[in-house]
Image (cartoon, grey):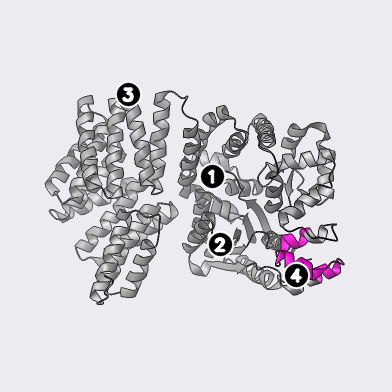
Amino acid sequence: MLLERQTQLAQLDGLLAQAGRGRGHVAALSGEAGAGKSALVEAFIGEAGARARILRSACEDLSIPDPLGPLYDLAREAQWAMPQAVDARRGERLPLFSDALDVFDATAGATILVIEDLHWADDATLDFVRFLGRRIANTHILLLLTARTDRSEGQMRVRRALGEIPAASVARIDVPLLSEAAVLSLAGAAGRDGDAIYRATAGNAFFVTELLSCECETALPASVRDAVLARAERLSAGARSMLDAVSVFPRRADAWALAGLCGVASAGQLAECVSNGLLDDLGDAYAFRHEIARHAIETMLTTSHRRAFNQRALSALLERGDVATARLVHHAVEAHNLETVRELAPVAAREASRVGAHRDATGYYEVALRQADTLPAQERAGLYEQYAFECHLIARIDDAIEAQEKARALQQALGNGLKEGDSLRWLSRFAYLLGDRQAADRFGAQAVALLESVGPSAELAMAYSNLSQLAMLAERLHEALSLGSRAMELAERLNRPDVVCHALNNVGAAEQWLDLASSRRHLARSLEIALQKNFQEHAARAFTNCACGGMNQLDYREAQSFLDRGIDYCVENDLATWRDYMHGVRAQLRLRQGCWDEAASEALDVIGNDQATALVRYPALVALAKLRLRRGDPSA
């Protein structure tokens, strides 16, 4: 019986009706764990099934999320061959997401896309939600999300993702705890003490359900965990062992995996767990009725039992051969199977990076590096380099520098001057991002000196371009042009458009004070190459320098255009560092245009982001300081 949810169901019905007319929406259901979000989804979908195509997915509580896991689920439900689409798009997300939008909006009627437990989502899945949310208004899609309202990092990332979708396209629907009256009604129908149940549960729907199913009449279990364990104790020994085995599978355990895990007796044991209300039979899989229940059973396992069950799960999944690498790594880590971790964690990291889940790629590299001591030095150095790159993309610059230093030391010991020189060039870049200009200049000069001694290379071309960028930023214009030209000449000879793109940006930015027409040509060419070749960071930098050039020439309309396009580009490609930097620049533009309140709001959004480095916060701080000076504010 679903009580006190008629308002939410009516709101969802209204949104579905609008989707049927071609006005899609995002509906975000939020509430604490156990509040009844999934029950509300089930009730809505059960009633809406005749009016819409329904595609379902969920995020899993893996140690590190499975990149785009929910999108793969939705693709299977829509019978779309997404793995081939990923390969065809070479991991580029925007074309892939565009394909997904075409698939999901292919029918004349409404389509409901469900993604549950978004607080466990990877970065790439959140980017898909942003992408779809920014285009959903003109579709027949209702995107139905559920997420917890705790103060976890995952929930904060969900809040930020929803905040970057146009407000008119998002309906936030609260799923509150049950009132005392509702609990008394449910308890009365079951012949139980409603007052005692409400005091114990405070209206948490899942806990209420567990206590109503509890056979203990004297003393109520003190927590959901205790209620679940009390029910589990009624199982036979075999069924209880099966319940323990299922508990190590986040979200759901495939029937074929359990058969491989527990043998021929598994069917009867699973049936007993289902009849006792501990598991749901999903047809091809089994799952706990709620993550709270799964977690309660899993936490009761001894370390040795948890490792043993995860190893058996890993073996069953490896035999299958078509399981997501993220799931394999999760079970390998839990099983303490170091050999498999060493083999698969770097693969999972590269897969995550490929689709733009950089936070998750960082996590996988951390897992790999914890077990890397026995690897050859060259392989270990490569892991540190890749880890440093991913860290810098998510603004963990201190970690990036530490990892790059370790990579450099390993390359130096191996006598690999080319790789050591490239490490020095990266250290120069990281030092600049951290705000340490002296270290940036020192590392940059050391990189060029070492790489020149090795001979012409793409690494040397990029080292020249790095020095050109540093000179441009210090307004040493002729030095920036000379080094930039040297970088472009070598890069073109070696067919490296990424380095050409980077150097064109430096040269164009420096030329604005010497030859405006040439500056605009070079910056436009840099942006064109970056967008064409999907050089995302180069594109963000080109948008920024084009906008700054417009502001310097007092062409505020052009600057506004580049900033708006650049920020949209960064949002859709999860380039948080450049997004925040450009918001600061746009705050400065708003100030120049006399839009003081908008300038303050945009600047404060950046300054309030604890993840932003000092360099990223700089344009916003300048805007806010100037504004407060003009207002006579003593806090300037």
Q: Which amino acid does the dot numbered 4 rest on?
A: Leu
Residue range corresponding to the magenta coloring: 185-210
Q: Residues within 10 Å of mark 1 (few under 14, many from 20)?
A: many
Classified by dominant secondary structure, the portion drawn in magenta counts as helix
Q: Which mark is residue 3?
A: 4
Disc 1 marks which amino acid? Pro
The numbered mark, 4 or 1, whose residue comes first in the sequence reads 4
- Residue located 18% across and 37% down the image: 486
Foreground disc of the pair 3, 1: 3
Residue at the spot 57% in from the left edge and 55% down from the top edge: 119
Mark 3 to mark 1: distance in Å?
35 Å
Q: Amino acid at mark 2?
A: Thr
The answer to which image quadrant residue 430 occupies is top left
Q: Which of pointers 4 and 2 lies earlier in the amino acid sequence?
A: 4
Q: Which residue is mark 1?
A: 67
- The quadrant of the image that shows the N terminus is bottom right
> Which mark is in front, 4 or 1?
4
Q: Earlier in the sequence, mark 3 or mark 1?
A: 1
Q: Earlier in the sequence, mark 1 or mark 2?
A: 1
Alpha carbon distance from label 4 to label 3: 68 Å
